[in-house]
Image: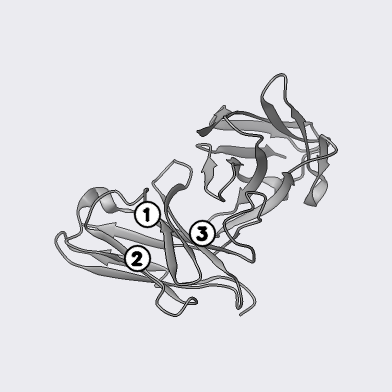
Amino acid sequence: AQSVTQLGSHVSVSEGALVLLRCNYSSSVPPYLFWYVQYPNQGLQLLLKYTTGATLVKGINGFEAEFKKSETSFHLTKPSAHMSDAAEYFCAVSGNFNKFYFGSGTKLNVKP
Amino acid sequence: GAGVSQSPRYKVAKRGQDVALRCDPISGHVSLFWYQQALGQGPEFLTYFQNEAQLDKSGLPSDRFFAERPEGSVSTLKIQRTQQEDSAVYLCASSSSGVSSGANVLTFGAGSRLTVL
């Protein structure tokens, strides 16, 4: 079975500050891990994914995430926040059969 | 098409009415998923199709929910005798690969927001 926990339903940062969104997962099989972003009234858009290989994954818009098996974590980071990063972010885990399990989401607010 | 298209974008139904939500996936995509996203929550899996075959419907919350994909392309999610707890955004997603790979990328539509009064 798979599940995802996102710590912090709301995160607020200043423009230019570091963004850190936390995700911990549980999986009975080697996990595939994803981060999606959702802007208001839009569908989810893939930011990045981890399947195998390099544990530091780079995605779009300057985001990256690191898979840490020992910590069962896949935290999302961005060195410098931009106003356009304000959105809701979802971490997801997938096992063998394409069934994705999503966290409850973290809303990122970026202050000018 | 270029993306996953869902219609209607917004639907208001009176309790007890039947509703049908349509999903037009990316052309040629084998896999199609339906998710339910309640307010303030992440998407929750409803059902999955590979071509026209419904391989997993374990997430459908009750027998009032029914999904089909008769020709392996367009899919319809039908909710009979709607209840207030059915109010949510219903997301459709498609993928180019089949069930054997959990690493597939899902492309999501913008969703259909259902409000049951």
Residue A31: image location, x then y, percent: 65, 37
Instruction: Locate the N terminus of chain B and report the quarter of the image it occupies.
Output: bottom right
User: Are circles 3 and 1 on residues that touch, CB within 8 Å?
Assistant: no
User: Are circles 2 and 3 on residues that touch, CB within 8 Å?
Assistant: no
Describe residue A103's horizontal placement relative to residue B21 as left or right. right
Residue for point 69% across, 19% down: A71
Q: Secondary structure at mark 2?
A: strand
Residue B57: image location, x then y, percent: 37, 54
Indicate the amino acid at tag 3.
Answer: Asn
User: Are circles 2 and 1 on residues that touch, CB within 8 Å?
Assistant: yes
Residue A55: image location, x then y, percent: 82, 34
Task: Please name which of the two marks, 2 or 1, marks the residue nearer to the observer.
Answer: 1
Indicate the amino acid at tag 1.
Answer: Lys
**Front position in the image: A44 or A18:** A44
Establish whether labels 2 and 1 are both on one chain.
yes
Chain for numbered disc 1: B
Question: What residue is pinned by disc 1?
Answer: B57
**Front position in the image: A62 or B79:** B79
Indicate the amino acid at tag 2.
Answer: Ala
Residue for point 38% across, 67% down: B10
Task: Please name which of the two marks, 3 or 1, marks the residue nearer to the observer.
Answer: 1
Describe residue A3's horizontal placement relative to residue B56 as left or right. right
Describe residue B48's horizontal placement relative to residue A78 as left or right. left
Q: Secondary structure at mark 3?
A: loop
Instruction: Locate the C terminus of chain B and report the quarter of the image it occupies.
Output: bottom left
Q: Secondary structure at mark 1?
A: loop
Question: What residue is pinned by disc 3?
Answer: A41
Circle 1 residues within 10 Å: few <14, some 14–19, many ≥20: some
Q: Residue furthest top?
A: A70
Question: What residue is pinned by disc 2?
Answer: B67
